[in-house]
Image (tube, rainbow, N blue to C red):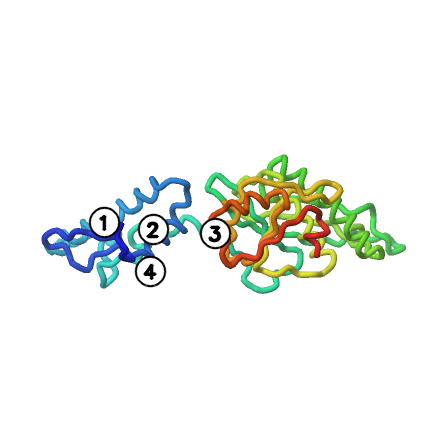
């Protein structure tokens, strides 16, 4: 275990002394190429880099021309996050932030999900579609909810519960508002090719719909996760550690968790909790505030 910020190599004969795999390259590999519990994939990527470096060293020593794909494009032998793509290609994962403006557009909230790759930050988007009005100016029928984004059965049920809670909350907060009767709501969870399931986006969906109905945008450094019951109770969920890591990766500063997960959060290592503002809610009225 060296304290050096890069991996140490023992240079063989004719190997450039400046040949290094920088720490920034290792961190980029972990963040953008190898999100997994183990290190097997990381090992494969490092081996790929060293094989290409070895080929380039031998080729330049012997004056042999390499193909465009294999030749060295940088003027340095150090592999950093700037030239990493020359050795392992484009990043497999992209940024979790779709929206950089603060606050977010109304009707959009960031949620936290647990996937096979660990935690993931995802947006819940809502958009209003005005209903057709009759001659007397009244809307035809009650408002409907349309949901897209490759959601599983459990998550689809969550959307219906969230819709009911949002309607109930709006009628309590603004009794005069007929927003959900005048407009149909279309809810979408981006990255439609990725299947998503589980109940933990309940409070996020409810907040997204209320943000739209009340014309109140949400701050862009806030994320939340938690199942919601029909009466507005916030129920505990799993994967708190993975979701916290996903929030940090996405640059989130404030997280709302269910009160039932406080013990899980308290048991996490301190370095994961640093500089995070965390709130625990047992009822949706707490989230609403």
Q: Please tell me which residue lies in front, 143 or 158.
A: 158
Count numbered badges in the picture.
4
Residue 212, relative to residue 147: is it above or below? below
Q: CA distance from mark 1 to mark 2?
A: 12 Å
Which is more N-terminal, label 4 or label 1?
1
| Mark 3 surroundings within 10 Å by alpha-carbon count, few (fewer than 14), some (14 through 19), many (20 or more) | few
For label 2, the residue is 89
SS at circle 1: helix
Instruction: Give the quadrant of residue 76.
Output: bottom left
Please state the horizontal and vertical placement of residue 240, each as a whole percent of the image.
Answer: 54, 44
SS at circle 3: helix
Residue 52 badge: 1
Relative to 70, is 171 on the left or the right? right
| Mark 4 surroundings within 10 Å by alpha-carbon count, few (fewer than 14), some (14 through 19), many (20 or more) | few
Residue 230, relative to residue 82: is it above or below? above
Of badges 4 and 2, nearer the viewer stands 4
Relative to 55, is 139 on the left or the right? right
Q: CA distance from mark 3 to mark 1?
A: 39 Å
Q: What residue appears at the point 21 percent right and 51 percent down from the top-left corner?
A: 53
Q: Please tell me which residue lies in front, 77 or 60.
A: 77
SS at circle 4: loop
Q: What residue appears at the point 78 percent right and 53 percent down from the top-left corner?
A: 170
SS at circle 2: loop
Please state the horizontal and vertical placement of residue 283, each as a whole percent of the image.
Answer: 71, 47
Residue 82 badge: 4
Which is more N-terminal, label 2 or label 4?
4
Which is more N-terminal, label 3 or label 2?
2
Q: Please tell me which residue lies in front, 240 or 84.
A: 240
For label 3, the residue is 270
Which is more N-terminal, label 2 or label 1?
1
Q: CA distance from mark 2 to mark 3?
A: 35 Å
| Mark 1 surroundings within 10 Å by alpha-carbon count, few (fewer than 14), some (14 through 19), many (20 or more) | some
């Amino acid at each position: 275990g060296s304290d050096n910020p890069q991996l140490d190599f023992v240079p063989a004969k004719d190997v450039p002394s400046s040949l290094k795999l920088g720490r920034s390259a290792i961190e980029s590999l972990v963040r953008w190429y190898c999100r997994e519990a183990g290190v097997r994939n990381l090992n494969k990527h490092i081996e790929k880099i060293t094989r290409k470096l070895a080929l380039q060293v031998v080729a330049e020593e012997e004056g042999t021309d390499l193909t465009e794909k294999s030749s060295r494009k940088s003027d340095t032998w150090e592999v950093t996050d700037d030239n990493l793509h020359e050795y392992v290609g484009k990043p497999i994962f992209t940024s979790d932030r779709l929206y950089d403006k603060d606050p977010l557009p109304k009707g959009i909230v960031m949620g936290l999900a647990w996937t096979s790759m660990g935690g993931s930050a995802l947006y819940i988007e809502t958009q209003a579609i005005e209903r057709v009005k009759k001659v007397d100016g009244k809307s035809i029928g009650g408002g409907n909810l349309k949901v897209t984004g490759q959601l599983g059965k459990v998550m689809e049920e969550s959307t219906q519960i969230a819709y009911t809670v949002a309607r109930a909350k709006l009628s309590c907060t603004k009794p005069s508002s007929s927003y959900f009767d005048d407009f149909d709501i279309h809810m979408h969870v981006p990255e439609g090719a990725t299947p998503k399931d589980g109940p933990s986006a309940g409070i996020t969906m409810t907040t997204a719909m209320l943000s739209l109905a009340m014309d109140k945008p949400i701050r862009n450094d806030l994320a939340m996760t938690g199942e919601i019951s029909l009466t507005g109770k916030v129920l505990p969920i799993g994967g708190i550690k993975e979701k916290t890591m996903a929030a940090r990766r996405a640059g989130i500063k404030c997280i709302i968790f269910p009160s039932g997960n406080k013990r899980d959060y308290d048991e996490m290592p301190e370095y994961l909790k640093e500089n995070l503002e965390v709130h625990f809610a047992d009822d949706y009225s707490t989230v609403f505030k």
